[in-house]
Amino acid sequence: MLRNIVRQSFDPLNPEKSCGQMAGDIYLLLGRVSFSNEGHIPFLRDVMAARMAEAKECFGPLTFFFKEARTHVYLLENEKNRNVNPMLTQANVLSSLFHFLIEAFHMFTKEEQEEFHEDGCLRLFEKKDDFYKFISFLNSTEFNGFSRNEFRLCNFDLSGANLSNADLGGADLKSADLSGANLSGANLSNADLSGANLAGADLREANLKHACPRGANLSRANLGEAKLSDTVLKYAHMEEAILSSANLAGADLSHTDLRAADLRGSDMTGANLTSAHLREADLSLANLIGAYLIEANLIGADLSGANLIDADMSRASLVGANLSDTNLDGANLDGANFMDGADMSKAREVSREQIGKAIVDISTKLPVFLKRRSKIVYCD
């Protein structure tokens, strides 16, 4: 049906006039009820798979129509009392077109995607605020909220977008480009951000609880005071990221690159930092009670004032690290490397037994009470 509308009305030499001619038929077709994920979307995918040439033919014209229709220019003339609330008709049309464009683009080959967008990423919103306005509009309609639609936004280009305080809970943002985006205060709980590019993004006070940014690029991103409890950040790139006062309790940060990251005052109670790369990271005053730092790279890290009660630091490398005023009560230091000037001179609640199982050398700065009578074996 959409193909017939496009073929009959769309003129690439006069797209604005063509869209006006298409509007009546599109509002008639899509205005009454929006696509549902349970019924329409699977059927839409099956139809597209069988008629890819037609989907490709419609993609360009419907992209242009979607951008024009977002300004509500066609609503007054074509709403025709299809719903009690005219805005619901508009939401039905826009959300259905958005679904069509997303699903079609994902079914194109890489070469076909690059015919429409050179970098192969779907780009439907030109201005920084456009996507936020689209989300806000859908959320303003009683039965057609953004989250309810479960749009597939993987490989979507939202770089630099202003999404401050946006509700993106549960969104599928796999491999999306959100670099430099403003997501401060945004709700990204349960969102799939695996492989997404969030480099340099502003995520201050954002809610990423139970989100999945596995393998995502969060380098130099600002996550100050963000909610990341129980979040899977495994293999994520977070070098030089700001995570001061962030809630990372129970988060999975195993194998995560956190080189030179700012984790001051963060809560990492029970977090999994196994094999994490924390070289020269600032963990001062961080709460790491019961955290797993097995084989973590903490070379040159600042752990001053950190709470490491019952943390497992076995086989971790703390060469040159600063542990001034660090609480090591009950911490497992088996095989942990404190050589080459690691400063433990003012560490608290650390015993001879703990240090005896660690690796130290003559340059290691040990607490004064251990220097008096020590069974410590120094490594050459």
Image (cartoon, rainbow, N blue to C red):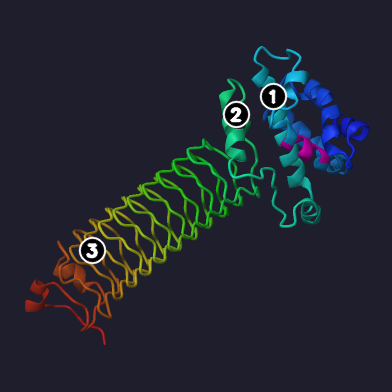
> What label does residue 304 carry, if any?
3
Helix, strand, or loop for circle 3?
loop
> Percent position (x, y) of residue 98?
70, 35
**In the shown orientation, is residue 275 left or right of residue 111?**
left
**In the image, is residue 233 above or below residue 151?**
below
**In the shown orientation, is residue 155 left or right of residue 192?**
right
**In the image, is residue 282 above or below residue 128?**
below
> Percent position (x, y) of residue 279?
38, 69
C-alpha separation, residue under disc 1 versus residue under disc 2: 9 Å
> Percent position (x, y) of residue 297?
38, 69
Regarding residue 189, the answer to whether it shows in the image is no
Q: Residue 31 versus residue 369: which sits nearer the camera?
A: 31
Mark 1 and mark 2 in contact? Answer it, CB < 8 Å. Answer: yes
What residue is rendered at 41% in x and 47% in y?
204
| Circle 3 or circle 1, nearest the eye | 1
> What label does residue 90 carry, if any?
1
Helix, strand, or loop for circle 2?
helix
Q: Earlier in the sequence, mark 1 or mark 2?
A: 1
Q: Amino acid at mark 3?
A: Ser
**Can you identify the residue that label 2 sits on?**
137
C-alpha separation, residue under disc 3 versus residue under disc 1: 56 Å
Which of the image's four quarters has the N terminus? top right
Q: Amino acid at mark 2?
A: Phe
Q: Earlier in the sequence, mark 3 or mark 1?
A: 1
